[in-house]
């Protein structure tokens, strides 16, 4: 697929995917629940991609392109950024994009295990069960796509710190219900906003734009499902349950977001790691980008009363609000 563009045609055409932000009845009945998953199944059947054939894996990496929109770089707007050559800036964004993809793989593996646990003993003939397996199948394709993309960008296998990996291991084993689905939503929404910018940016290498487009289209269904599940699981929940879940989701979100750009990207881009880390941590431009991109997500969490004072402290530390 030489000369890949950023917006490949799906295998077939049909109805558009549901948007993530549509409001739902806070107490839907079972038929309404299944109407949602039936629509998601229909959308997946008519608007899905096979990254193995849609993405141009064969053309060598063109280093005249960025890996992500420069404005999303953790160093954009800093003194260090102003000193960097264009070649260094492009290499940094390629390493950062690969790190985000690697973090995406890590969390998609957590997501798949939580969803499988949730449907383990449920009715396999129901649309809910079949949609859950469809989502897992899409996530498997996404993880392979991200892995191949990171490799093509010339990046190593970036992973979260060992302590974060072990926290993730505990979370994917213990989290359930609204805590699982709300955390899934946070990870998906933050990545979605970045990728919508990257897929439209002609400065970004074409195969990465294609990857981002595929992920944005298919992930819109996953966000729709996560929002619906969060609302449904919280229907009738009391104060204590909301407080506990709000705290768990906020802590999980903090570690997900702060793991997106691995601290080793700077050294792999040929930069002074310590200086880059210091300037990235103080970068008000990047903090503002994160806050503005998460406004809709924070509104949703507030609407289901998961934006408690303890939770706010973690969202502020992650610069999501």
Image: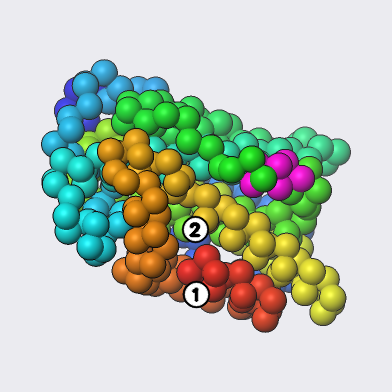
Q: Mark 1 points at which residue?
A: 321
Percent x, y of residue 48: 44, 36
Residue at 81% across, 48% down: 174
Which residue is depicted at the point 30% across and 39% down? 269
Quadrant of image for the N terminus: top left
Q: Which stretch is magenta?
A: 164-170
Residue 125, disc: none
Label 2 secondary element: helix
- Closest to the observer, 276 or 73: 276
* Residue 9 drawn at (x, y percent): 29, 36
Q: Is residue 72 visible?
A: no
Q: Is the magenta stretch mostly helix, strand or loop?
A: helix
* Residue occupied by mark 2: 189
Mark 2 burial class by Cα count in 10 Å: few <14, some 14-19, many 20+: many
- Residue 173 appears in the rendering: yes
Q: In this view, does 318 lie above or below 62?
A: below
Residue 115 against residue 279 in the figure, above or below:
above
Taking the image as shown, residue 88 lies to the left or right of residue 117, namely left
């Amino acid at each position: 697929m030489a000369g890949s563009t950023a917006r490949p045609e799906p295998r077939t055409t049909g109805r558009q995917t549901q948007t993530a932000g549509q409001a739902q009845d806070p107490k839907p009945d079972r038929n309404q629940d299944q109407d949602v998953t039936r629509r998601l199944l229909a959308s997946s059947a008519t608007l899905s991609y096979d990254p193995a054939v849609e993405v141009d894996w064969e053309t060598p990496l063109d280093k005249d392109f960025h890996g992500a929109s420069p404005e999303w770089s953790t160093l954009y707007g800093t003194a260090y950024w102003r000193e960097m050559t264009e070649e260094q800036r492009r290499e940094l964004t390629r390493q950062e994009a690969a790190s985000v993809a690697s973090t995406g793989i890590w969390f998609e593996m957590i997501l798949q295990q939580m969803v499988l646990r949730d449907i383990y003993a449920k009715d396999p003939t129901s649309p809910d069960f079949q949609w859950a397996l469809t989502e897992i199948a899409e996530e498997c394709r996404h993880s392979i796509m991200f892995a191949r993309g990171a490799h093509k960008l010339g990046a190593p296998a970036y992973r979260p710190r060992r302590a974060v990996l072990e926290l993730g291991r505990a979370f994917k084993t213990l989290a359930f219900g609204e805590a699982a689905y709300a955390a899934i939503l946070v990870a998906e929404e933050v990545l979605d906003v970045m990728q919508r910018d990257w897929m439209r940016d002609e400065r970004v290498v074409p195969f990465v734009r294609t990857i981002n487009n595929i992920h944005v289209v298919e992930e819109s269904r996953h966000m729709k499902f996560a929002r619906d599940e969060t609302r449904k699981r919280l229907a009738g929940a009391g104060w204590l349950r909301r407080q506990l879940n709000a705290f768990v989701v906020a802590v999980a979100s903090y570690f997900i977001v702060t793991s997106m750009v691995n601290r080793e990207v700077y050294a792999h881009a040929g930069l002074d790691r310590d200086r880059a880390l210091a300037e990235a941590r103080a970068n008000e431009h990047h903090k503002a980008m994160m806050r503005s991109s998460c406004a809709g997500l924070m509104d949703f969490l507030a609407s289901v009363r998961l934006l408690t004072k303890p939770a706010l402290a973690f969202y502020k530390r992650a610069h999501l609000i």
